[in-house]
Image (cartoon, rainbow, N blue to C red):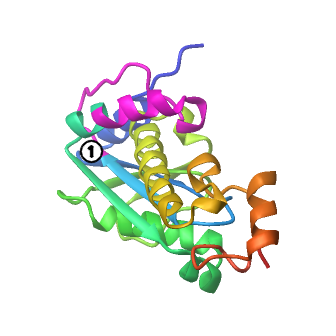
Amino acid sequence: MEIDWRGFENNARRAGYKIIAGIDEAGRGPLAGPVVAAAVIFPEGADIPGINDSKKLTPAKREKLYGQIYEKAISIGLGIIDPTEIDKINILQASLLSMQIAVANLYPRPDYLLIDGTFTIRSSIPQKAIKKGDSQSLSIAAASIIAKVSRDRLMKRYSEDFPEYGFHKHMGYGTRMHREAIRALGPTHIHRKTFRGVK
C-alpha cells in the first residue's frame, strides 16, 4: 500500500492548524558524539520525491534530499546535545531536549508538532507522537534526513581531530573497529562515558 506522506500534516490542517513541524533525532545509539535533532516546517502541498526514513537511504541519497529539503522548507531548526550532557541526563532525556531546542529554533513558531517515536516533548504547542513516523510523515522523514546528515558531518569533522578512531566510517557507533580503538587508546572527550563499551 502506498504511503500518504502528507496524511498526518493534512489531518492537522483539517483540525485547524496551519504551521506544522515534523521532528526527529539522530544519534541515540552511538558510543561517541552528540545527539542531533531537526524540526522541519513545509508549506502546504510540498512534495519531495524519494523521501523516506533516513535509515533506509544511502548517504548519497540523503545528501541530495538534504539540499532539496532546505530549498523547499519554510523553516528548519536544529538541536544538538553534547556527550557530556548526555552522560548527565541520560540519552532519552537528551534526545527529547534536542528536539525541544530544534523546535525553539524554528521561525515562524509552529502551532502543531509531529514527533517521531512514542514520547512527546516539553512544550505548550499541541503535538502528536507517531511510532515510526519517519516512515509515514513527509515532515518527520525530512527532519530525520536533516538530523542524520547534520550529525554525520559533525562526526566527519571529529574524525579529523581523532583520525585513529575512524569516526568518518562508523559515525561513533559501536562497530568492532571503534570498540578496539577505545580499548587500545581509551575514550576521547566526545565519547559517552556512561555507555557500555566506553566505561
Point 79% across, 61% down: residue: 179
Left or right placement of residue 197 versus residue 103 in this view:
right
x, y percent for residue 7 = 43, 29
Q: In the rendered image, which quarter is residue 124 located in? A: bottom left
Answer left or right for 40 relative to 31.
left
What is the x, y in percent for residue 47?
31, 24
> Foreground residue, 40 or 168?
168
Would you identify the image quadrant in which residue 56 lies? top right
Going 74% across and 77% down the picture, which residue do you hit? 186
Question: Would residue 141 be counted in the magenta stretch?
Answer: no
Which stretch did the figure color magenta? 41-67
Q: Quadrant of the C terminus?
A: bottom right
**Residue 24 appears in view:** yes
Give the SS element for disc 1: loop
Picture layout, residue 87 above or below residue 100: below
- The kind of residue on which mark 1 rests is Gly
Q: Residue furthest bottom?
A: 88
Q: Nearer the viewer, residue 94 or 15?
A: 94
Q: Position of residue 169 (x, y in %)?
A: 61, 46
Depth check, front residue: 80 or 19 = 80
Where residue 64 sits: x, y (%)? 36, 29
Which residue position holds label 1? 16
The residue carrying pointer 1 sits among few (fewer than 14), some (14 to 19) or many (20 or more) residues within 10 Å by Cα, namely few
Decide whether residue 51 is among the magenta residues.
yes
Q: Is residue 43 visible?
A: no
| The N terminus - image quarter | top right
Q: Is residue 78 left or right of residue 92?
A: left
User: Residue at the spot x=58%, y=57% of the render?
Assistant: 27
Q: In front: 187, or 52?
A: 187
In this view, 139 is above or below 107? above
